């Protein structure tokens, strides 16, 4: 009986987490430009490939910094008027 409750709890947790989205800020260290995405693919060559939600462009970076961010920061990033260039 205890294992049935455990299985039900795991199934419930899986359903809840299936609807969750992870938000990322991908930064290009050389230029400092920031991109925002919800899906990152690592290529065989070791680079990362993703779709920048702000521009809709597919981006491939050989060198990048990836940071998981909250939804609010993601939404602010994709709606800001600046093209992802860092402030000086």
Image: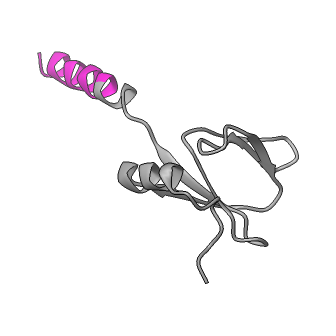
Residue that appears at 43% across and 48% down:
75
- Residue 60, compared with residue 1, is above or below; it is below
Q: Quadrant of residue 85?
A: bottom right
- Residue 86, compared with residue 28, is above or below; it is below
The chosen color scheme is one colour
Q: Position of residue 46 (x, y in %)?
A: 82, 50
Q: Nearer the viewer, residue 80 or 50?
A: 80
Image-based side of 67 in relation to 29, left or right:
left
Q: Position of residue 18 (x, y in %)?
A: 38, 26
The quarter of the rendered structure image containing the N terminus is top left
Q: Quadrant of residue 38?
A: top right
Image-based side of 36 in relation to 76, left or right:
right
Residue that appears at 25% across and 20% down:
7
Which residues lie in the magenta part?
1-15
Q: Within the magenta stretch, is there residue 14? A: yes
Assign the magenta stretch its main secondary structure.
helix
Q: Position of residue 2 (x, y in %)?
A: 13, 22
Image-based side of 17 in relation to 50, left or right:
left
Q: Within the magenta stretch, is there residue 88? A: no
């Amino acid at each position: 009986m205890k294992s049935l409750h455990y299985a039900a709890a795991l199934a419930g947790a899986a359903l809840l987490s299936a609807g969750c989205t992870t938000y990322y800020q991908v930064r290009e260290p050389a230029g400092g430009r920031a991109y925002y995405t919800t899906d990152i693919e690592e290529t065989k060559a070791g680079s990362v490939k993703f779709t920048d939600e702000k521009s809709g462009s597919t981006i491939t970076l050989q060198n990048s910094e990836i940071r998981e961010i909250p939804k609010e920061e993601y939404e602010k990033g994709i709606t800001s008027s600046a093209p992802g260039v860092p402030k000086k």
